[in-house]
Amino acid sequence: MGKRFPEYKTLDLSKINKDILKIWDENDTFRKSVREIDGKGEFVFYEGPPSANGIPGIHHVMARTIKDTICRYKTQCGYEVKRKAGWDTHGLPIELGVEKALGITKEDIGTEKISIIDFNKACRRDVMRYTDQWEDLTRKMGYWLNMDHPYLTYDNRYIETLWWLLKQLYTKGFLYQGYTIQPYSPAAGTGLSSHELNLPGCYKDVKDTTCIALFQLIRDEKSEFLFNHNDTPSVHIMAWTTTPWTLPSNTALAVGKEIKYIKVRSFNPYSGEPITVILAKDLLHSLFPEANGGIHFSEYKPGDKKVPYKVIDEFPGSKLEGINYEQLIDWVKPDKGAFRVLTGDFVTTEDGTGIVHIAPTFGADDYKIAKEYNVPPMILKRKDGSMGPMVDKKGYMIPISDLDDKFVKERVNFNTYSVFAGRPVKNEYDESLSENTDTLDVDIAVMLKLSGKAFRIEKQVHSYPHCWRTDKPVLYYPLDAWFIRTTAFRERLIELNNTINWKPQSTGSGRFGKWLENLVDWNLSRSRFWGTPLPIWITEDRKEEKCIGSAEELKAEIEKSIKAGFMKKNPLAAFIPGDNTQENYEKFDLHRPFVDEIILISPSGKKMFREPDLIDVWFDSGAMPYAQAHYPFENKENFSDKFPADFIAEGVDQTRGWFFTLHTIAVMTSDSVAFKNIISNGLVLDKNGNKMSKRLKNAVDPFSTIEEYGSDPLRWYMLTNAQPWDNLKFDFAGVDEVKRKFFGTLYNTYSFFALYANVDNFRYNEKDIPINERPEIDRWIISLLNSLVKEVGNCYEDYDLTRAGRAIQDFVTENLSNWYVRLNRKRYWGGDYDQDKIAAYQALYTCLETISMLTAPIAPFYMDMLFRDLSITTGKYKEESVHLTRFPNYDEKLIDKDLEERMDIAQKISSMILGLRRKVSIKVRQPLAKIMIPLPDKTFKKKFEAVKDLVLTEVNVKEVEYIDDTAAILVKKIKPNFKTLGPKYGKLMKEISSVVSGLSQQEIVSFEANKSHSFSINEQQITLTIEDVEIISEDIPGWQVANEGRLTVALDITVTDELRYEGIAREFVNRIQNIRKENGYDVTDKITVQIEDHEFVHEAIKRHAAYIGSQTLATSVSLAALVKSSGSREVEIDEVVIKILVNKAG
RNA sequence: AGUCCCGUAGCUCAGUUGGUUAGAGCGCUACACUGAUAAUGUAGAGGUCCCCGGUUCAACUCCGGGCGGGACUACCA
């Protein structure tokens, strides 16, 4: 093989990115890499489907780098990693995008402005709008993903699986209809999403009538303690509300468990009647001004502005739990179990009375707590048989004529309710009402006041949401919805979650675990158009339901309906059950409005209509393990190969999204986790820690970043800068640093290798030199390399990519480049092609090649380049790409911790000596006679002898002298060893420490000699052994000394004439090398050198001409009178200017 | 409001089971090196380890309570 290792002028990672992509394409490398080796089987990875209706951002590079790195690693380990791509195609953002593009609103859909058909068509088109950009990013960033047959959530086959899953849940009773309190606009007749509620200007300050109502307690065992020492027959609980219109729907009161409450005797400020009331202690003075406490009850007359009060009792909220009270407003009787005091976390003492009025039909918290305690909501039966709240959807108190007659007879107090029935709860809902008309709130408050049930009525300004379309106040209103009974699986969800390996662990146990503990049923309903329709058909009387679980079933049901004459033809007529081709599944559409047009027949022969809701898109993505396989219609037998996933990764913002729905659906349908390992990464912020946004123009464009730097530095930076679950403050300076520091150094190391390997024609043709015949430093780097392989492998296995990358970077920049190559440079240039040189090449080659394989998962482009440059030249591996190689194994036998320690000592000592040289300003080129090292322990000498030559060469010193630790010239320092002393002496530590550090030199020496030292503290005899202290030789008076930890080194700085001559010779070598380079000579060119004779250099050149010649490839080095010779150069050495003439030889 | 993450040098981050000189890189300053060379090395300056309490002989580390930044979820009488 005449091949040479490729040499490059510069490192252009952007170009490498493109070149390697081309090579991967030409060789079909990705497809080749999807295979298994040695029966390892599949490593199952799930791709969280992105939505292609937005353009990809830099944060996508983050999550995808993590995914790609793990998948590439597992591939190298021999697993088959299939990586099917997918697209999330449904959902609100897509609908909103289309609405915006078409200039329409939700209300226009299904009208003459735009039909549902056309709207959904637009969505279907729009959803794949940026597919090109996504695929482009996927490719350029090196994210290997199979994009040939992505799963699409709008595909009928995908939807069919969703329906199948829903039917499983339905059949087991885990899919049910209920209601939820949602923001609702009576004026627009529509529910509002939280997104709509967060539009600017929605929250407005409005002035509303507020009321503190008095709820009379029922005297029984539980409440008895509240009736002690009273002079009033009744006791009232005070509760505040800003919506008095909800008071008739009150069915409970809530207090805080930990909150302190008090019983107060006072007077009703309106009627002047004596009252005994309960409220939170903290709010006493906001209702009863402190000054009034001094007024004697006898001084008070009804009508007085200042009402006296007296606190009688105090108790925690927990004591109030379970107490019953009389209904405040007797219009309608609810079911049994109402009018109880409950405890809730949400109760505060910030305003009001510290007691919250609960109307389960009009507040989300209210609904939740009522459900928890089984308190019935105030619901009324309508003429059509349905149950609903006291307010209708137009925002009016429901007219009695709309109610079921029997219900009215049994439950409604006609006399009291008829006065208020039919009135709007907010005046804004009735155009005929002016601003000045008394509101329902006012009238209810006045009614309470007149019956002595109100304590305070006042207008207050507060912030309240308004409908963005009609500008009228929003109502929190119970809306019908379908739920998945996730709460039935709470225990199992938690149990299985505990088996998942979360990175970071805290997200699993904390954010996700807590979420599971506080689980509520999953509200599946969405009143939208573009999404998976709920496959449930119901009769008009809502008594018969049918859930459809497949296209085949639907087709058959329609046939029945056709027979009954409900439908004319079957939209699925052409569909052939069992044929799973795309073509077959494109013969119909399961989306709206087509499914809405399907009428089915009930068992009793009635028409059944589809429930108009769509399902939450999160069900789409959470069901992806099943639906991407079109399970169980396809892949039924081999499903266990594809489920559950070994690994997933997404941003932490998916905790309540994808992670939750994946987990829940898997647990509920398969009693299994959906994924075994998970990395959830944090956010990518701008360099100042702000969220990236289009508005702030601080978003980083992934495409231009990759174009400029290449993907590798970007990927490397993202993984190694900090743990991926911490937020990343993205800074280009960091990417730049990675490029220079890591890739630059690695590239330099390779270039160095290539340059000399080509000169020497090294092709790794020689047999590996046996490890025991290699020099110490080669065995050292090989030992470190094996340690590195072990560590990096462990990190990858542990899904800790940050540590893996950092370990590699540390090895490359510190050990390989800065130490191994630097110290060994001379072995590569000049000299014979002997065993030592071959060993040096082999070691360096092995390091580089192994690094490429270790690092390929993180930096797939450059590492493939590096691997190919090495391996194609030597033919050591038959694989054409590093991504087809096996992850390297380490050899425990090659790891020599003693050796690694020895080299560590060498590095430390060298660094100390270089520091000393600097302190006294003696250049490294100037040889010095010796160093002295006091022996810190018995084994040191042996260890250091092994690396002595390295150190001496590195620091340019002739010899080393060891100083026995008993030598009198040493000044010693003693330190207590807290780790051993601490447990033994505990409290005496402080005294011992001061005694020990106060020991004299003599005492230290005798301590060392006797191996122990005794003294007493507070009459207690204490004997320390040598293990209890650390003694170091800190100083040698009269020498240049440095120490670090237990190591101490002294440098002899005397420069004899002999040493000076040698130093001058080295200076000449340096100058001549510079001239060679300036003249553009090739590394192998021979030269001749003439040096101007000068007293200063004469002796040095005479003695060391041969040395200079050997270092500079000079055939002759001579002294001459070079006064004006052309081509001569002037060099300066120690401020002496010398002329020198360098020419190519021969 | 709840849950979680983060808070260590000007910046980005390490810091093993608590142990007494708290580290690295970048940046800054100075010096050096120079056949890896638009690289590199050595050193210096720079820290109330967010604050307050507690446990302990000993706390950056463990516990409690705050504060600040961020995310998610929820939303109120």
Image (spheres, coloured by chain):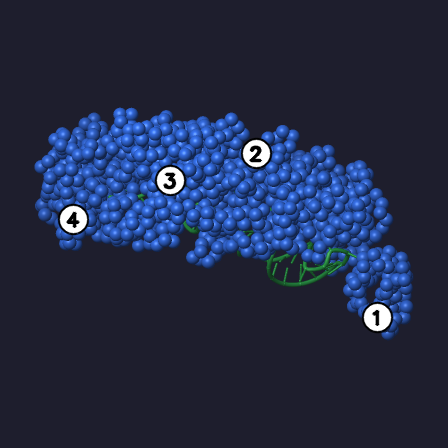
The residue identified by callout 3 is A591
Q: Chain B drawn in what color? A: green
Chain-order first, disc 4 or disc 3? 4
Q: Chain A drawn in what color? A: blue
Alpha carbons under labels 1 and 2: distance apart: 69 Å
Q: Which amino acid does label 3 sit on?
A: His
Decide which of A990, A495 is in the foreground and name it: A495
The residue identified by callout 4 is A439
Q: What residue type is labelled 1?
A: Gly
The residue identified by callout 2 is A43
Alpha carbons under labels 1 and 3: distance apart: 87 Å
Above or below for A451 versus A1144 = above
Is disc 2 placed on a helix, strand or loop?
A: loop
Above or below for A923 versus A576 = below
Q: Which residue is drawn at 37% across and 40% down?
A: A591
Decide which of A1091, A190 is in the foreground and name it: A190
Q: Which amino acid does label 2 sit on?
A: Phe
Alpha carbons under labels 4 and 3: distance apart: 45 Å
Q: Is residue A376 visible?
A: no
Q: Is residue A543 visible?
A: yes
Chain-order first, disc 2 or disc 3? 2
Q: Quadrant of the C terminus of chain A?
A: bottom right
The residue identified by callout 1 is A1127
